[in-house]
Amino acid sequence: MFARRARQARLVTVAIAFMLVTVACDSGTSDGGASANPDSTQPSSSTATSTTSSTTTTTSTTTTTTMAPIFALEGRIFGANGAPLHDATIRVGDEEQITTTRGVFVFEAIAAGTIEITRPAYKPIEVEWDGSDPIVAVTMEPVVAKALRAATAVVRDDDQFADLIELAAATAVDAIVFDTKKEGGGVLYDTRVQEAHDIGAVTGSPYDPKQRIEETHAAGLYAITRIVSFEDPIRARARPEYKLAGDWINPINPETWEYMLDLGVEACELGFDEVQFDYVRFPTGEASRQARKTNPTTQEDRVGAIKAFLTEARDRLHPMGCAVGAAVFAIVFSSPDDQGIGQRPEDLAGVVDVLSPMIYPSHYSAGWLGFDDPNDHPGAVTADALDDGMPRVGGGTLVRPWLQAFYWTNDQILESIRAAERRGVGWMLWNAVGNYDEAALPDDSEEEPDGESGEDDAEGADG
């Protein structure tokens, strides 16, 4: 809680009055000095001079102009886990402020009224303020998205996309994830970013993202796009000077960032609510071995490069109203180091709005948590990853995991979803071809049966 400064709100009232003084003119007297009133003057046999008296009256008018009372206002905005929120927009009347890194805003002189607060990844809020309290504190509610990824074939086909929207309407799904730049480096729409055309990245049958976004918003759904970043064989071939190793672009060189950042800005202009950068890391496998030989790096180098790239993305997209997300390996949620890829939760928290660990138990080795096959334990593996990583994520950053929707039955998918929801977080389902079954998805009215906690806590799994 920030220190409350005692500040007396000062009321300034300005009133200006103009008054005209009534002037009455009364003239005319007889030779004898007596008052002459035309109503009482009588004719005389003697010669007399009659004088007519006239009176003019000017009406007095008073005009008062009063300004609205003016107050000082300062406040602080909080988000997930009680963390202060930077980059929140505060509007009171025609005045606007942006919160600092400590979530603070200050208006030196403002009229009372409605305080409107908006911020990417959080729901807008209005607070009625009468000026009596010079200090306010507001906690915003995050967007806890529950999303399905729309595969390329789905977004290109009107009927398939309509089916996906209908599935969302019948379930708790409230968001759709689109690809605008995918694995392999392909850009899936007719972008205005010239480099994509120069290197031959726009191929196949492009879809119209603006139309799909409009359809998504019309259905009341949140629209997220996914931009595959540093894994890009098309660009690595076309721009060898940017290549790190294999199919990977070098994240340490800031010149390599502009292409992805330009695509992110354009995505926001198209109408996406959130831009998620995927493959926002250093390579693994053979490309990693090559990179260690030709471009050796330290953990500080790697983490610093990824953090700097995402900070630049946030600084460009937040003023446009878009949230920024990053997909990360689930293993970094359970590991104290960056696993050689430049991702650590505590370093990225506070930089991006959403961190999305990819919790795919089918990718875990035998023996993880003591399980012969971790893929057979959806709830336990999902819960363990989130429990390891969530305490390391602060700064108002939300956790929203990618969960697998492949190699599993509907009940197993639902078990993984429930493990996430018990921890108060949203989720995104990954299926390569966009094949989802309604039976695998919760609905808004669904309550988990008493006692059916699955393998939520993974307690005893090591035994």
Image: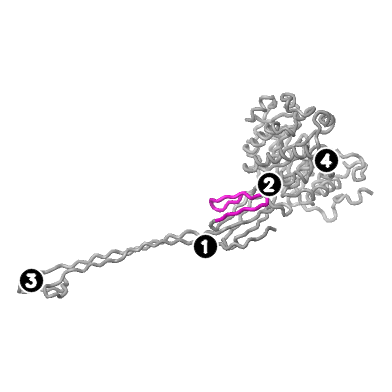
The Cα–Cα distance between marks 4 and 3, rounded to whole angstroms, is: 123 Å
Return the residue at label 2. Answer: 121
For residue 128, above or below residue 323:
below
> Which one is nearer the viewer's eye here, 301 or 143?
301
Give the amino acid type for the residue marked by disc 3 in the picture: Ala
User: In this view of the protein, can residue 215 be seen by the observer?
Assistant: no
Q: Mark 4 vs mark 3: give the one in front.
A: 3
* Residue 360: image tag: 4
Return the residue at label 1. Answer: 11
Mark found first going from the N terminus, 2 or 4 = 2
Give the amino acid type for the residue marked by disc 2 in the picture: Ala
The Cα–Cα distance between marks 4 and 1, rounded to whole angstroms, is: 60 Å
- Where residue 275 appears, as percent x and y from the top left, is 69, 39
For residue 102, above or below residue 257:
below
> Which one is nearer the viewer's eye here, 458 or 342?
342
**Do tag 4 and tag 1 residues touch (Cβ < 8 Å)?**
no
Q: Mark 1 vs mark 2: give the one in front.
A: 1
Return the residue at label 3. Answer: 48
Mark found first going from the N terminus, 2 or 3 = 3
**Do tag 3 and tag 1 residues touch (Cβ < 8 Å)?**
no
User: In this view of the protein, can residue 108 be seen by the observer?
Assistant: yes
Q: Quadrant of residue 212?
A: top right
**Do tag 2 and tag 4 residues touch (Cβ < 8 Å)?**
no
Mark found first going from the N terminus, 4 or 1 = 1
- Residue 235 lies within the magenta run: no
Label 3, secondary structure: give it.
loop
- Tell me if mark 2 has few (under 14), some (14-19) or many (20+) residues whose alpha carbon lies within 10 angstroms of its own: many
Give the amino acid type for the residue marked by disc 4 in the picture: Tyr
